[in-house]
Amino acid sequence: MGNWEENVRKVVPYVPGEQPNKPGMIKLNTNENPYPPSPAVMKALGEIRADGLRRYPDPSSKILIDAIAESYGIDPNQVFVGVGSDDVLAMTFMTFFNSNRPVLFPDITYSFYDVWADLLRIPYEIQALDEQFCICKEDYKKKNGGVIFPNPNAPTGVLLELGDIEEIIQANRDVVVVIDEAYIDFGGESALPLIEKYDNLLVVQTFSKSRALAGMRIGCAFGQPMLIKYLNDVKYSFNSYTMDETALAIGAAAVRDKAYYKETVKKIVATREWVKKELREMGFVFEDSMSNFIFAAHTSVRAQYILEELRKNNIYVRHFHKPIRISNYLRITIGTDDEMKKFLKTLKNILEKR
Ligand code: PMP
């Protein structure tokens, strides 16, 4: 055997949440939306013709970009789209984090960031969240090769105020600052208006959560035209046809139906606030979440035990073993009222049995 393995790029991959498909399961493990996508999406799906699939999709993704720009009141050349925000974020790492200085992100955060950094050999330095799982803005004021964090942060759900975000951007005018707003629609204030003021700010969003389209894979980024141009240069150097024809049509239909999206987000937020109260009464502790999940630890029962018992009842939540500081926490996605009633009832039984 030759030693070709020496020349292989070896990586420790990101591990996505599992996608079981069991009848009657309550799936609260990957922050999906419990409601179906907009009826406009169903209509657009019905209008897709198989014959059109002979052709390559529009590499510029014009119909989707125009619909997003119109909906957000910005210019199409301030919008970039990709195959879920994972694709947009991967392009972002490739495009903007090209320095010998380390990129900064929190110690507890989206666990894909260090995977992309390692894959692309980008130096990085993690910054510890404080005791309340809050991002300490002062940590992001040193020399660096770029800054990225989710707002609200994941898996904590903790939101950083817009004023603090602006302070971080102002302290980092020589690098690109990326705010990953996967969960911003569930109660936070978006940094989107700041793109007019700061040419080094990129705001990334997704259609997977508030727009209930995780299966369609649509994400986007907002920034000044120069940032978007650089992103496109890398995209066209990697894969020109990222977005398929179906995703373009579905995404455009979804983003236009603002009323439906607002209504489902409102329902999820109301359920979240009710579930927070119930969990506290059961002895769970957590920081306030402004996302579609709650990141909670029980004061006396171990997370691993609760996770396993819930699973025996066909209920799935997410558990992260690392870092150690969060190993006793469970991340619970907000489902429908009915799902959460069943979840809470089962949880009560599990805790009483102990
Ligand atoms: N950012 C954060 C913080 C996330 O939690 C997720 C969901 N896994 C993503 C980005 C990626 O979402 P998607 O690729 O579905 O848009």
Image: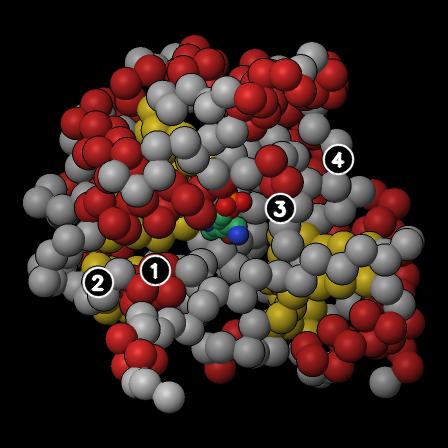
What is the distance, in whole Å, between disc 4 and disc 1 at their CAs? 31 Å
Label located before the other in sequence (2 or 4):
4
Residue 292: assigned label: 3
Of the pair 287 and 13, the residue shown nearer to us: 13
Residue 351, picture quadrant: bottom right
Asked if disc 2 and disc 1 are in contact, CB closer than 8 Å, the reply is yes
Taking 200 as reference, is 326 above or below it? Answer: below
What is the distance, in whole Å, between disc 2 and disc 1 at their CAs? 8 Å
Q: Which residue is mark 1?
A: 116
What is the distance, in whole Å, between disc 2 and disc 4 at their CAs? 38 Å
From the viewer's perspective, is 329 left or right of 55?
right
Three-letter code for the amino acid on which mark 3 is drawn: Asn
Label located before the other in sequence (2 or 1):
1
Residue drawn at x 91%, y 81% as measured from the top left: 353
Taking 144 as reference, is 249 above or below it? Answer: above
* Total number of numbered discs in the rendering: 4
Three-letter code for the amino acid on which mark 2 is drawn: Ile
Mark in the foreground, 3 or 1: 1
Label 1 SS:
helix
Residue 246, picture quadrant: top right
Q: Which residue is mark 2?
A: 122
Provide residue 26's location: percent of width, then percent of height: 82, 55
What is the distance, in whole Å, between disc 3 and disc 1 at their CAs? 25 Å
The quarter of the rendered structure image containing the N terminus is bottom left
Of the pair 194 and 5, the residue shown nearer to us: 5
